[in-house]
Amino acid sequence: MQGRSKMKLIILDRDGVINYDSDQFIKSPQEWRPIEGAMEAISLLNQFGWRVVVATNQSGVGRGLFDMDTLAAIHDKMHRCVAQAGGRIDAIFFCPHAADSKCACRKPKPGMLLEISERFNVDLEDVPVVGDSLRDLQAALAAGAQPVLVRTGKGLRTEADPALPEGVPIHDNLAAMVRALTLVSD
């Protein structure tokens, strides 16, 4: 796209990529626990000049399982943990709508990723979108970004899914993905 910046931007799903996931949702800061190596991986991305953005479905808000203040407190804990590792998350985008919503932002729809593209004025063509579920990868493809699968969270199930798009890079976890990325970066 004309006039779009070529900044090094990476988009991460939250639950199952940065922190442990739960079938009962992450409903409080106490339930939010980082996956080993994820905080350091985000810090390493920053050291190599990457802007880190989180794009996460948070239907627990739409379902009434937790409110926006609680979501903000969970994200505050995530920011603090990343900062303790020497890194930062530049922005968090989230869809608060329930799964049956007709919104355009809930992954696998590309709305959230397209909003990130607009806000950061960046073409998503070379932007890695790291997720653990098929819907993360589908959203990346629909937005014209580069889907990347990690085996944490729902990743092992996703890897075995026959609907897994062909050619998607797969890494054991965020730390392994970032090590591979920074070896070829700069």
Image (tube, helix red, strand yellow):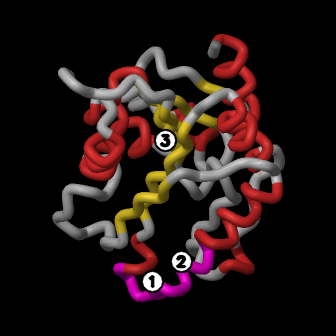
Q: Amino acid at mark 3?
A: Ile
Q: Which residue is mark 1?
A: 68
**Quick check: is 141 in the magenta stretch?**
no
Q: Amino acid at mark 2?
A: Ala
Q: Whole-Å distance between the Cαs marked 1 and 3?
A: 22 Å
Residue 13 is left or right of residue 110, and the answer is right
Percent x, y for residue 46?
66, 38
Q: Secondary structure at mark 2?
A: helix
Disc 3 residue crowd, few under 14, some 14–19, many 20+, Cα 10 Å? many
Q: Earlier in the sequence, mark 2 or mark 3?
A: 3
Q: Amino acid at mark 1?
A: Met
Q: Secondary structure at mark 3?
A: strand
Disc 1 residue crowd, few under 14, some 14–19, many 20+, Cα 10 Å? few
Q: Which residue is mark 3?
A: 11
Disc 2 residue crowd, few under 14, some 14–19, many 20+, Cα 10 Å? few
Identify whether 146 is placed above or below 68.
above
Q: Whole-Å distance between the Cαs marked 1 and 2?
A: 6 Å
